[in-house]
Amino acid sequence: MDVDLLPLRKRITNTFKLCGFLIRSENSSYLAEQLLPFDASERDKWLTVITENLQSQKLLTPHVERAALEKAINELNRVGLDEGETVFALIDAFTVPRFRYNQRIKKFELDTQPRQLLTAPRMKSDYMQQRYAMLLQKTLRHDLFAPAVIQDGVGAEAQAKKFKLQFAENLLATSAMKEAVVLGLLTQLKEGKFYVEDPTGCVQLDLTGARFHAGFFCEGCFVLAEGNYNNGVLKVDGLGFPPAEPATSSRAFFGTANTWGGESAKLLKYSAGLQELERTNTETTIVFLSDVRLDLPVVMDKLRQLFVGYDSCPPQAIVLMGPFTASTRNHHELRHHLDALGGLAAGCEQLKKQTDLILVPSSEDPTAPNILPRAPIPECLAAGLLKAWPRTQLATNPCRLQYCTQQIVVCRLDLMAKFCRNTLHFPEDTSQIEQHFARTIVCQGHLVPIHPIAMPVHWDYDPALWLYPLPDLIVMGDSCQSFSSSQHGCTVLNTGSFVKSKFAFKVYIPATRTIEDSEIPDEME
């Protein structure tokens, strides 16, 4: 292969020199590999348009780096797409845009204030207030709370019963109120005593006779408490979640702004070109695995089988979620395991050229603290893998994927166990536990609606954990039993543990929005 590339590499170097560019040998080899499948005349055409694209990028130096080459090739591959539109993109959690709800114009506006990990103390309450504002505005629009409209002579009393949402200050200003409904944060301000808290105050709850709706009611989530208020205590008859809202309804309050993240200024949901690509690319798949322990020889054997099996029909991406090694091991051992992971793809040339390998770390992987969102695995530990498989991408946890017009959230977290440990009321119907799980995160519009002690969050980057507007697919890498559940047009998928489930994994087919259960057999014939 290298011998075949020598004349082409020389041709690339000479063409770049004529255009005023310098290119290193490793980068010319990369470009030669991309051009090798074409005949000589096609290669010359591609070289011309690539150098023209590089000139339009206005590089700071004449040296052409790998990133500039990849950008040029990706832009030229986007036939029929507008500027900023990409077929597939990985979006870093720390670059997800932050929006604030403007009560006056009843719209979300982009917040361009700089953000940082060690942020101002006021953000400790601000990020919860923003989450509350998001839930409040969609709750007030729901049929149960929207003002009744008289139609065709039919009065409000003849229509469905409506509720008036009260604030904590409304209750605190009176001694008694029947059929009060309050939206607020479920919190334990005193030992054994729960309160519902909103920006105007807090009201003590009496939950002794409460009927809990579906879901996990953990301290730190937002609830709708309905009951009778008397002498400072709200005796709760029913405790539920804020209503979920379909993404199509939510997007109306953002306009065409890109709420998802990525290079495009507009939301790619509205791209006609991407919609057509999504419809016609029926063979495209995305593969998800969690608990990929690279320090276990049997896991490495199964991954080799996976790579060889997919070499003839490469997926769009293979997403591997941690932990990648035992937490007690030396962090630098991970470098050797990642090097070995790159070696597993030896000979799988089509896979390495056409498939993105995405690594999502768990809380046990080095070197970030156990706070969400979590930084990627350091590049210094994955240098060997990046060289062996150039399309490897080191992702944050959580991260976002964009395939054509579809939005996918990926998060590696044992959230089911946290819900079960922290809930005030365990669901009675345990056979539908996955429905309770899905309903909790969908209604809350957040990936981790629990107390910060159970799962700390970087205050300034809390919007990276928002599920509002709802994405098309939420992929949880939870080590509990795998499941999938659909709620309001959003599918919640749990991959389960690759190690514990006899090497099972999930395959998502975007064209049909279906999920296939797959498993690597003991022996491949």
Image: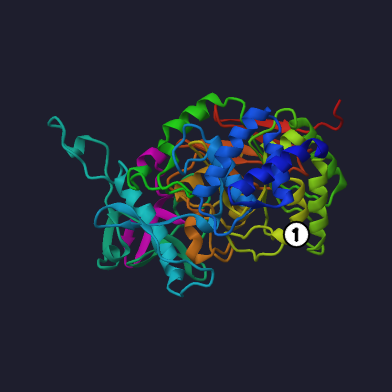
Residue 17 in the image: state x and y as whole percent: 63, 49
* Res. 456 image quadrant: bottom right
User: Position of 247 compared to 77: left or right?
Assistant: left
User: Position of 76 compared to 523: left or right?
Assistant: left
Of residue 157 and residue 520, the one placed in the foreground of this image is: 520
- Residue at image position (48%, 52%) is 466
Instruction: Give the amino acid at mark 1.
Output: Leu
Q: Is residue 231 magenta?
A: yes
Residue 228 in the image: state x and y as whole percent: 33, 56
Q: Tell me the quarter of the image containing the N terminus.
A: top right
- Whether 386 is drawn above or below 128: the answer is above
Q: Which residues are magenta?
A: 221-249
Of residue 102 and residue 32, the one placed in the foreground of this image is: 32
- How many circles with numbers are drawn on the protein? 1
Of residue 262 and residue 373, the one placed in the foreground of this image is: 262
Give the secondary structure at mark 1.
helix
Q: Tell me the quarter of the image containing the C terminus.
A: top right
